[in-house]
C-alpha cells in the first residue's frame, strides 16, 4: 500500500516523538512491503515564529492532500502567559481539526499488564481497564461565537450543538461498542445545559437502533470521579468537546503516564493521529520524552487503513519494550534509555 | 448568639443527613449557650411533587429572611431520565443560588490523618493534602442564555463572565490564600475560551495587590490530572462555575469518600451550607448515609458567624468519631453504625 503522510511535529517534544514514529513506519514499510511518503510542515508556536500564522496555508494544503496526518504536539508557555496575544499556537490545531472536519477524537485507555504497577490507582481497579473515549471534536464551546465587550469588561463563549453533529459521532461510538463490551456511557450535564439535553435526546433515540448495546448516562462531575474510582466499569465513553478534553486527560492517570496514550481524530475524508500529551517544553531536546504515545497513535493510523497485521506488529514491539524495560524515565525512574533508543528498539522489533 | 436557620433537606438522603447537623447544633446551643431556630421548607423533587415548583416562593422567602440556610441534597432519577421534562429538581438549587446571590462556593479538601488509608490514591500524595476550591457559583454557562431551535435540532448554551463577577470571588480566594499556604491556582481553558482569557487578565491584575501570594495558572485538562496525582501541591484553587463543579467532585476521590466533603456558598448578604454529595436515592431511608459532610458544612456555618470555638468543637467530635471508628459503611465496609448513631455520637461529643 502507498500512503502520503503529512508530518506536523509542532512544538516542544512534538518533533522528537514523531521522529520515532517515522522510524517505526520505515520499519513497517520494509517488513510488510509498503511505501510511505513523508512531508513535513509547520504548525503551532514554531509556525507563528516563522510565518506569523499558527496554521500556514501550505500546512493545511499538505494535510488536505495527504492520506493522513501524523501530529506531534503544540503549545509554548510564552503564549500562555500573554493573555493579550492575538495569535497563539492552539489556534493552529483547532483550525486544522475544523478544516479537515475531524469530528471524532478517539482515545483508547488501556492498562498494559506489565505496567499495571505504574498506575497510582489501586491495581484491582485499573488492571481490567479497557475503555475508549469518543470525544466530539469539531463543535461545542470550542467553536461557538466568542466575544469580548468593547470596554473589555465582559466576555462570552457560546456552545452550540446540532442533531447532525451529535448523530454522526454517536453512530461511531455505538458501532465501536458493538465490537467491544457493548456499553456506551454518555457524559453530559443535562441537569444544567440545554446542549446536554439535546445530546441525551439524540443519543437515546439513536441507541434504539443498537438494541445489543446498553446506554448509560452520567453527569460530568460524577463521571470524573467514577473514571478514577472504577475505570474498568467503562467501555465506550461518548461526550462533547469540552468534557472530552477533561476526561481524556484523566485517562492518563489510569494508565500511569500521559506519555502512553494515543489518539485518532477522524472525519469522513481525513484522519489525523496524535498523542494526547502536550508539548512539554521543559523536556524539549533532552531525549527523555516517551515516544510510545506517538508510536501507538501511528499504530492507530495503520489500523485506520486496515493494516491490522502491521498495527499489531507495532503494538507487539511496544509491549516487548515494556517487558524488556526499554522505557523512558517517566515509566521507570532509574531508566537510562532515551527517546531515540526506545524508538530504535521498537522499530527494530517490528516483525511479521 | 441567636440564629434563624432555614433547613432545606431536599431529596434522597438530604433530610437524613441534615437531621444529624441539627442534632449537633442543638448540642452546640446547650454547650455554648446559643439559641438557634430551625424552619424547614421544600426544595427539589419533593417540592415539585407537592407544589409543581422546584423552589416554591415560601422556600425562597424563608431563606432570604433567615441568617443562613442548611441544605441537604437534591435530584431524582425520574427527572434525569426524562429529557423532555419542563421542570426538574436542580433548577430549584440553581435558582436559589442566584436569588441569594451566592457567588462563591468554598470547598475545602483535607485528608484527615486517621482516614489517609481510606483514599484510593498513594498515601504519599494525599497525606499532606489541604486545599480549598473557590468555585464561582452565580455565573458562567450555568446561567447564560439557553435555547433550543424551533425544529428542536439545535441547542445553545452561553457562557458569560464580567470583570465584576470574576473580581469579587478572586479577592475572596486571595484573602483566603493569605492565611494559608499563599498560593492561588487559577484553573481555566485560556487556550480556547474567551471567558478564560478574561479570567486570566482580571485575576493577574488583582494578584498584584497580593504580592505575598503566588499565582499559578493551569488548564482544566491538566488541573484534573494534577489534582489526582499531586493534590498536596495545591493551596487555593480558583475557577469558574463549570470547571469548579468537576474539580470539586474530584476532590472527593482524594478524601476517599464523597460523604466527607463540606461546602459553604456565600454572597454578600446570604450564606448556605451544603455537603458536596448528591441525593443518593438508592440509600434513602436506609440509615447508611454518611452525615459527616453535612455536619462539617454546619461547622463551616458556625465559622461563618465567627463561632470558631464552636466550629472547632464540632470538628473535634467528628475526628473522635473517626478515631473510635464510629463511622458509616462508606468509610469502613464492616461498620454496623448507621447515620443516626454516628450523628448521635458526634452530637454527644461536642464539648467546650
Ligand atoms: C491544545 C488544546 C487546544 C487541545 C484541546 O483542548 O483540544 C488539547 O488539550 C487536546 O486535548 O488535544
Ligand atoms: C445539582 C447540580 C446542579 C449541582 C451543580 O452542578 O452545581 C451539583 O453538582 C453541585 O456541584 O452542587
Image (cartoon, coloured by chain):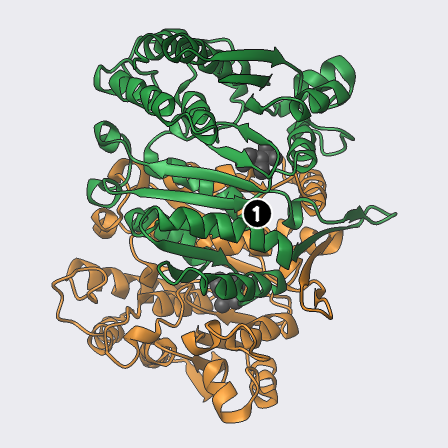
Chain colours: A orange, B green
For the image, the number of numbered tags is 1
- For the residue labelled by badge 1, is the local secondary structure a helix, a strand or a loop? helix
Q: Nearer the viewer, residue A251 or B203?
A: B203
Residue A134 on image: x %, y %:
54, 53
Residue receiving disc 1: B242
Taking B332 as reference, is A151 left or right?
right
Quarter-of-image position of residue B101 = top right
Q: Position of residue B246 (x, y in %)?
A: 50, 44
In what quadrant does ligand 2 lie?
top right
Q: Quadrant of residue B259?
A: top left
Could you say where residue A271 lies in the image, as x and y percent from the top left?
55, 70
Image quadrant in which you'd find residue A139: bottom right
Q: What is the x, y in percent for residue B163?
A: 63, 59
Is residue A155 shown left or right of residue A343? right
Left/right of residue A268 with respect to residue A82 in the rendered view: right
Local crowd at mark 1 within 10 Å, few (<14), some, or many (≥20)?
Answer: many
Q: Is residue A147 above or below residue B150?
A: below
Which quadrant is home to the C terminus of chain B?
top left
Viewer can see residue A132: no
User: Is residue A53 placed above or below B15 in the rendered structure?
Assistant: below
Say whether residue B267 is visible. yes
Query: Is the residue marked 1 within 8 Å of ligand 2, measured from its CB?
Result: no
Q: Is residue A172 left or right of residue B261?
A: right
In the image, residue B238 sits, relative to residue A80, either above or below, namely above
Q: Chain of mark 1?
A: B
What residue lies at 44% left-to-right and 64% top-to-bottom? A300
The residue lying furthest to the right in this view is B150
Amino acid at each position: 500500500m502507498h500512503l502520503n503522510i503529512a508530518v506536523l511535529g509542532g512544538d516542544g517534544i512534538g518533533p522528537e516523538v514523531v521522529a520515532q514514529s517515522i522510524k517505526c513506519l520505515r520499519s513497517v514499510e520494509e517488513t510488510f512491503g509498503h511505501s510511505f511518503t513523508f512531508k513535513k510542515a509547520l504548525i503551532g508556536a514554531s509556525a507563528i515564529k516563522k510565518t506569523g500564522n499558527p496554521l500556514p496555508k501550505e500546512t493545511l494544503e499538505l494535510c488536505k492532500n495527504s492520506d493522513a496526518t501524523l501530529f506531534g504536539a503544540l503549545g509554548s508557555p510564552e503564549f500562555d502567559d500573554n493573555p493579550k496575544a492575538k495569535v497563539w499556537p492552539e489556534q493552529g490545531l483547532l483550525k486544522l481539526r475544523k478544516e479537515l472536519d475531524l469530528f471524532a477524537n478517539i482515545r483508547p485507555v488501556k492498562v498494559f499488564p506489565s505496567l499495571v504497577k505504574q498506575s497510582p490507582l489501586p491495581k484491582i481497579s485499573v488492571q481490567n481497564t479497557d475503555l475508549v473515549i469518543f470525544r466530539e471534536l469539531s463543535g461545542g464551546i470550542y467553536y461557538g461565537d466568542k466575544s469580548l465587550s468593547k470596554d473589555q469588561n465582559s466576555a462570552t463563549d457560546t456552545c452550540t450543538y446540532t442533531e447532525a453533529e451529535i448523530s454522526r459521532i454517536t453512530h461511531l461510538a455505538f458501532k465501536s461498542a458493538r465490537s467491544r463490551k457493548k456499553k456506551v456511557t454518555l457524559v453530559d450535564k443535562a441537569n444544567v445545559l440545554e446542549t446536554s439535553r439535546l445530546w441525551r435526546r439524540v443519543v437515546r433515540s439513536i441507541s434504539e437502533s443498537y438494541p445489543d448495546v446498553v446506554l448509560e448516562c452520567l453527569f460530568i462531575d460524577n463521571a470524573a470521579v467514577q473514571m478514577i474510582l472504577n475505570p474498568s466499569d467503562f467501555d465506550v465513553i461518548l461526550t462533547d468537546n469540552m468534557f472530552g478534553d477533561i476526561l481524556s486527560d484523566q485517562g492518563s492517570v489510569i494508565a500511569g503516564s500521559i506519555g502512553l496514550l494515543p489518539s485518532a481524530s477522524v472525519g469522513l475524508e481525513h484522519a489525523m493521529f496524535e498523542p494526547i500529551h502536550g508539548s512539554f517544553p521543559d523536556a524539549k531536546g533532552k531525549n527523555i520524552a516517551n515516544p510510545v504515545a506517538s508510536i501507538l497513535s501511528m499504530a492507530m493510523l495503520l489500523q485506520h487503513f486496515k493494516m491490522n497485521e502491521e498495527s499489531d506488529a507495532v503494538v507487539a514491539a511496544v509491549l516487548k519494550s515494556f517487558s524488556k524495560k526499554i522505557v523512558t524515565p517517566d515509566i521507570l525512574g532509574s531508566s537510562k534509555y532515551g527517546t531515540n533508543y526506545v524508538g530504535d528498539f521498537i522499530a527494530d522489533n517490528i516483525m511479521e
